[in-house]
């Protein structure tokens, strides 16, 4: 991973356009080729980013990151580099869920029709630049759906799924992607936030799933 702290401005040019004025920022270049721009707030959510496949061209005064499929560009104009270092992190073992969450994911993937008649599984642990989505599937209309599974559904789980959806919906091969937040128990505040984000909620009965019975329906 390469870490660059620079005073820079950033322009995203493509289906959408966005501009970040000149300011000190952290630029992350990961081994998978992804590039993300961060400020000193917003937790770990980047201000802008480019997912792989993409290529980075460095020139005097700036960088141009071009997506290999869409041609969209992230143009970074650099006024001053304050720090530039590279670090070998190696292969990450990945996030390990507790036994119940891991088993819920396995059961739901095996019986994806629990979410609705005609639903089909694309794959478990679908990779993104910020971590794997628990389940990626298709609904009965052929639309792509990302499912995040928790034992207890809190606001942070909805935020996590929101970040996945932002990334997934940049991929023209699978977009548009809807979200489903699934848990054994979902807090009222999490339901409100999910509804505001256009994310469906499903309450899962672990014992019923183990017996291959139907859970609550969407919405």
Image (cartoon, rainbow, N blue to C red):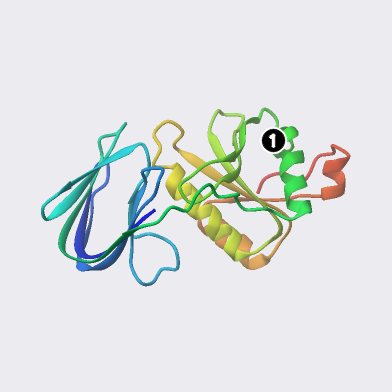
Badge 1 crowding class, 10 Å Cα cut-off, few under 14, some 14 to 19, many 20 or more, is: some
Which quarter of the figure has residue 110?
top right
Residue 13, compared with residue 188, is above or below; it is: above
Residue found at the very far bottom of the displayed protein: 40
| Tally of marks | 1
Where in the figure is residue 182, as x and y percent of width and height?
Answer: 68, 50
Within the image, what quadrant is residue 212 found in? top right
- The answer to whether residue 176 is above or below residue 50 is above
Please state if 177 lies on the left or on the right of 207 as rendered: left
The residue depicted at 60 percent of the width and 50 percent of the height is 94
Residue 74 image point, x, y percent: 24, 48
Q: 169 left or right of 184?
A: left
Residue at the spot 57% in from the left edge and 29% down from the top edge: 141
Q: Position of residue 138 (x, y in %)?
A: 59, 32
Residue to which mark 1 is pinned: 116
**Image quarter for residue 18?**
bottom left
Rendering coords of residue 143 (x, y %):
53, 33
Provide the secondary structure element on which disc 1 rests: loop
In the displayed structure, 158 sits above or below 118; it is: below
- The answer to whether 145 appears left or right of 204 in the picture is left
Q: Is residue 111 visible?
A: no
Observer able to see residue 124:
yes
Q: Nearer the viewer, residue 63 or 158?
A: 63
Q: Please give the name of the residue rendered at 37% of the width and 44% of the height, measured from the top-left corner.
A: 51
- For image coordinates 82% across by 42% down, the residue present is 209
Q: Nearer the viewer, residue 101 or 26?
A: 26
């Amino acid at each position: 991973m390469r870490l660059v702290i620079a005073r820079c401005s950033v322009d995203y040019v493509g289906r959408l356009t966005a501009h970040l004025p000149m300011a000190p920022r952290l630029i992350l270049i990961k081994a998978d080729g992804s590039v993300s721009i961060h400020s000193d707030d917003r937790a770990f959510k980047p201000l802008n980013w480019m997912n792989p496949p993409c290529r980075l061209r460095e020139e005097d005064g700036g960088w141009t990151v071009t997506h290999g499929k869409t041609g969209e560009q992230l143009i970074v104009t650099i006024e001053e580099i304050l720090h530039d270092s590279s670090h070998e992190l190696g292969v990450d073992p990945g996030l390990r869920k507790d036994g119940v969450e891991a088993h819920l994911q396995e059961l739901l993937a095996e019986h994806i029709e629990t979410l609705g008649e005609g639903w089909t599984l694309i794959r478990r642990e679908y990779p993104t630049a910020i971590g794997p989505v628990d389940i990626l599937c298709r609904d009965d209309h052929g639309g792509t759906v990302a499912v995040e599974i928790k034992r207890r559904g809190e606001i942070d789980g909805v935020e996590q799924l929101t970040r996945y959806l932002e990334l997934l919906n940049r991929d023209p091969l699978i977009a548009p992607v809807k979200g489903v937040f699934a848990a054994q128990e979902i807090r009222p505040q999490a339901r409100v936030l999910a509804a505001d984000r256009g994310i469906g909620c499903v309450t899962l009965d672990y014992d019923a799933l183990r017996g291959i019975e139907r859970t609550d329906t969407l919405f």
